[in-house]
Amino acid sequence: MSKHTPGPWHCNHECDTILDAGGFVVALVSRISDRAAPEIHANGILIAAPPDMLEALEAIEGMCRRCERLDIVPDCSEVNTTLIAPPKSR
């Protein structure tokens, strides 16, 4: 399996093109439909989110591994919301 294009990714102004940090195109959001602009924008934000999501999951995995090593059961009711914040356009 090959590696993904490194993040962060972001949407252009119309959110129909997803770009990496260097400005290279990662993905295009189809405008060949009757989708409204807000839906296209929302789709673009979701498509741009995977690098941020992977980073958050890796941080959560690290916390879980530390808890395992220390043989403690964490109280996950107050998980750091910065790790699981909704995707955002940059």
Image (cartoon, rainbow, N blue to C red):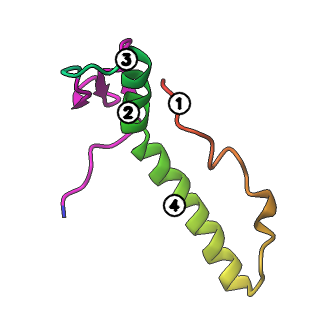
State which tag comes first along the sequence, 3 or 2. 2
Secondary structure under the numbered disc 2 in the rendered image = loop
Q: Could you give the CA–CA distance between mark 3 and mark 1, rounded to whole angstroms? A: 19 Å
Mark toward the start of the polypeptide (1 vs 4): 4
| Spot occupied by residue 77 in the image (x, y as percentages of width and height) | 80, 62
Q: In terms of sequence position, does the residue under pointer 4 or pointer 3 come before the other?
A: 3
Q: What residue is shown at x 52% (from left), y 59% (from top)? A: 57
Distance of label 4 from label 3 (alpha carbons):
34 Å
The residue located at (18%, 21%) in the rendering is 32
| Residue at image point 65% right, 67% down | 63
Q: Residues within 10 Å of mark 4 (few under 14, many from 20)?
A: few
Residue for badge 1: 88
Q: CA distance from mark 3 to mark 2?
A: 23 Å
Seen in the picture, residue 86 relative to 66 is either above or below; the reply is: above
Mark 1, residues whose alpha carbon is within 10 Å: few (<14), some, or many (≥20)? some
> Please, what is the dominant secondary structure of the magenta stretch?
loop
Mark 2–mark 4 CB contact (< 8 Å): no
Q: Earlier in the sequence, mark 3 or mark 1?
A: 3
Instruction: Find the distance from the CA under tag 1 to the CA under tag 4.
Output: 19 Å
Let me know if residue 40 is in the magenta part: no
The answer to which of 59 and 78 lies nearer the viewer is 78
The reply, left or right, for residue 74 in relation to residue 65 is right
Determine which residue is flagged by label 4.
Answer: 58
Amino acid type of the residue that numbered disc 4 sits on in the rendered structure:
Glu
Q: Say the numbered circle drawn on residue 36.
A: 3
Residue 82 pos. (x, y %): 67, 44
